[in-house]
Image (cartoon, rainbow, N blue to C red):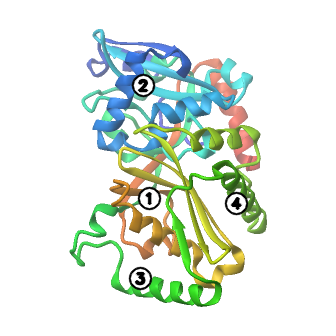
Amino acid sequence: MLSSGLNSGLKDGLNSGLNSGLSSRVVTPADLTELEITAWNALSANIAHLSSPFLSFQYTSAVAESGVNVKVCVISQDGQLRGFLPYQFQNRTSEWLKSAEPVGRQMTDYFGLIASEDLRITPATLLSLANLNQITFSHLDESQLAYGLTGELPRPGLRIPCDKIFNGNEVDCPISQKHMREMTRREKHLKEDFGPLEFTFDLIENRTEHLHNLIRQKRAQYKRTNVPDVLAQAWKIDLLERLLFTKSSSCRGVLSHLQAGDQWVASHFGIMGNGVLQYWLPVYNPEMAKYGPGRLLLDNICKATTLHNIHTIDRGEGVTPSKKEILSDEHYFYRGVWHNNSLPTLVARGFQSVLWRLGI
């Protein structure tokens, strides 16, 4: 198992000037006050590195409403509200051990503090404030290190700067002229074979039915490609359904659809907020693979960003040849384990080590 190296104990972290005057309360998302929710939304809207919908109150609340045991550590300093740390417990045993994980687990693309930019805090103090012995995490964005947080094994992620796509400057445009010509060629062949293309950025009619079809197709893709089915648990389907009808400036569901004639080509379900679209669950018709349906879908979504006030398409962690076809801004995600040295922590870490070695 990975460790962020918190072996010096909590006392030193708590006594340092870095963390002076801090206090907290731990509640469920439903128990947050209106003032606290407003403050959370303001942080998401006004601080660029907190703009991902995965860090929004609405996403955290939707996970909790899906039946997951979610908690929020509300952090104050000298009586002033400073930030929030959402997390969840996988089961009753992990709650008893005070061993937490990011909200949404494999479903989430971001984890970390939602806090004022000038807050400085150590992982040890954060654990103490959240009443945790340990938290195992991934997807800690590099911007979180400025708070004083730590992680290991940085992995790259990509963001498409959509505000450069249609600014008239071919040099800055993330989509090359070669890529545009290739997409035009593929669209032409698709139209010739199946009929005119119809793209909808966010379907309104039969919304739930289209989401369920996307889920079926995505799970079939996982099976076809021998990838673990991350949508197998019922609470995750419930989460997607809740997000589908979430309407907030910080987080709302977006269901995109591309078809040629009467043939389904590709779909995508993501969440957007504060000008950021999280590219989350794309799926395409495997019978149309030769037309590059996934690329055509993303191309059409990129073209729609100006109309929908989207400045960034966040493609999450990982860099692949297909992702590199569109010039993107690179950043890094960290992972690790923040922990103290209590007996429950040693038990939890031993159990997790066994699961890790078994590949579970």
Q: Name the residue under label 1.
A: 156
Q: Is residue 54 above or below residue 78?
A: below
Q: From mark 4 to mark 2, how far is it between C-alphas? A: 33 Å
Q: Is residue 47 above or below residue 296?
A: above
Q: 10 Å neighbourhood of mark 2: few (<14), some, or many (≥20)?
A: many
Q: From mark 1 to mark 3, how far is it between C-alphas? A: 23 Å
Residue 111 visible somewhere in the drawing: no
Q: In this view, does 226 lie above or below 269?
A: below
Mark 2: secondary structure = strand
Mark 4: secondary structure = helix
Nearer the observer, 8 or 271: 271
Residue at (72, 27) in percent of width and height: 91
Place residue 346 in its image quadrant: top right
Q: Position of residue 254 (x, y in %)?
A: 52, 51
Residue 56 visible somewhere in the drawing: yes
> Which numbered circle lies on residue 131?
none
Q: Earlier in the sequence, mark 2 or mark 3?
A: 2
Q: From mark 4 to mark 1, how far is it between C-alphas? A: 24 Å
Q: Name the residue under label 4.
A: 218
Q: Which amino acid does label 1 sit on?
A: Pro
Residue at (52, 55) in percent of width and height: 202
Question: Seen from this angle, which residue lies furthest top?
Answer: 79
Residue at (76, 65) in percent of width and height: 226
Q: 10 Å neighbourhood of mark 4: few (<14), some, or many (≥20)?
A: many
Q: Mark 2 points at which residue?
A: 84
> Which numbered circle lies on residue 179?
3
Q: From mark 4 to mark 3, how far is it between C-alphas? A: 26 Å
* Front disc: 1 or 3: 3
* Front disc: 1 or 2: 2
Residue at (48, 66) in percent of width and height: 319
